[in-house]
Image (cartoon, rainbow, N blue to C red):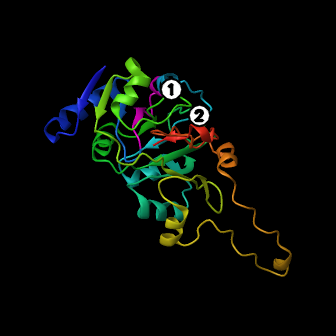
Amino acid sequence: MSVYDIRDEGSRDEAVEAATAAVRAGELVVLPTDTVYGLGADAFNHDAVQALLDAKGRGREYPPPVLIADQNVLHALGVDIPAVVEDLADAFWPGALTVIVRAQPSLMWDLGESRGTVALRMPDDEAALALLKRTGPLAVSSANKHGRDASTSVTAAAAQLGESVSIYLDGGRSAGGESSTIIDATVEPPEILRHGAIAKDTIIEKLGDIFASPEPVGPDADDAEPAAAEPSDAEAADQLSPAADPAEQPGDDAQPTAPDSGDRADT
């Protein structure tokens, strides 16, 4: 286990290279994000992803989300991506917004019981993006044991995860601390599965009410069923697709599956 202080730009490159080597070797790393500290593994290494779940004490029913370094990767990892996802990414990436989309069926990965979906996010953190540009997509969950508080410092992460992690990147105390907002874009209209750092009102202000059901059209419009009420956070957690575990966002382990909102501490 090694800890690198990346607050000094002079030592950051060496630290990121060490973390890159660890990821390529199938080992786990802890990295800062714009929300909370994340526990990362090569998304395409089955054993590494399982090691991540084991380190957290989570089952495969809680697949981790995937962090990416570039918006263009959306189409490499997802399929049938609706225009609203592009709009969300344009408006809020890099940033604290996770979107669940249909996963490319040809991808050679195993994130857990993801039900054919994947939760994607582009973090707004310089060190995290530098690492992602070298490693490619990382499966990242909050750097904490399942059911415990998300870590906002390397010290807190190491106290919970210890020797299960090869490299800790210390970027100081997390500036964010609040998990990302998770939106399920596999349904129409999109649904917020976890309310987080980006408020629903902020999304509506920028993009209009993308969450509203389309107005009924035709002779039976007056008899249309009223729109269902927005689910509570607890109900939303049960609806999560295996790619977005709102209970975890680097400090939150989430991936688009239906995890327990109480442990949605994924980045």
**Which of the two discs, 1 and 2, labels the residue nearer the N terminus?**
1
For image coordinates 56% across by 31% down, the residue present is 147
Q: Is residue 106 visible?
A: no
Q: 185 left or right of 28?
A: right
Comparing 95 with 106, the one in front is 95
Q: Residue 44 in magenta?
A: yes
* Circle on res. 56: 1
Q: Which residue is mark 2?
A: 62
Residue with the most extreme left position: 10
Mark 2 burial class by Cα count in 10 Å: few <14, some 14-19, many 20+ = many
State the image quarter where residue 90 is shown. Answer: bottom left
* Mark nearer the viewer, 1 or 2: 1
Distance of label 1 from label 2 (alpha carbons): 11 Å
Quadrant containing the C terminus is top left
Which residue is found at the position 36% from the left and 40% from the top?
A: 136
Determine the residue positioned at 47% across, 54% down.
197
Q: Amino acid at mark 2?
A: Tyr
Tell whether label 2 touches label 1 (CB within 8 Å): no
Image location of residue 216, percent across then percent down? 76, 75
Asked whether the viewer can see residue 1, the reply is: yes
Q: Quadrant location of the N terminus?
A: top left
**Residue at figure coordinates x 28%, y 47% from the top left:** 126
Q: Is residue 106 magenta?
A: no
124 with respect to 204 (left or right): left
* x and y percentages locating residue 144 in the rendered image: 47, 30
Identify the secondary structure beneath mark 1: helix
The span picked out in magenta is 36-49
Residue 173's image quarter? Answer: top left
Vertical comparison of 106 with 232: above or below: above
Q: Secondary structure at mark 2?
A: loop
Mark 1 Cα shell of 10 Å, populated few (<14), some (14-19), many (≥20): many
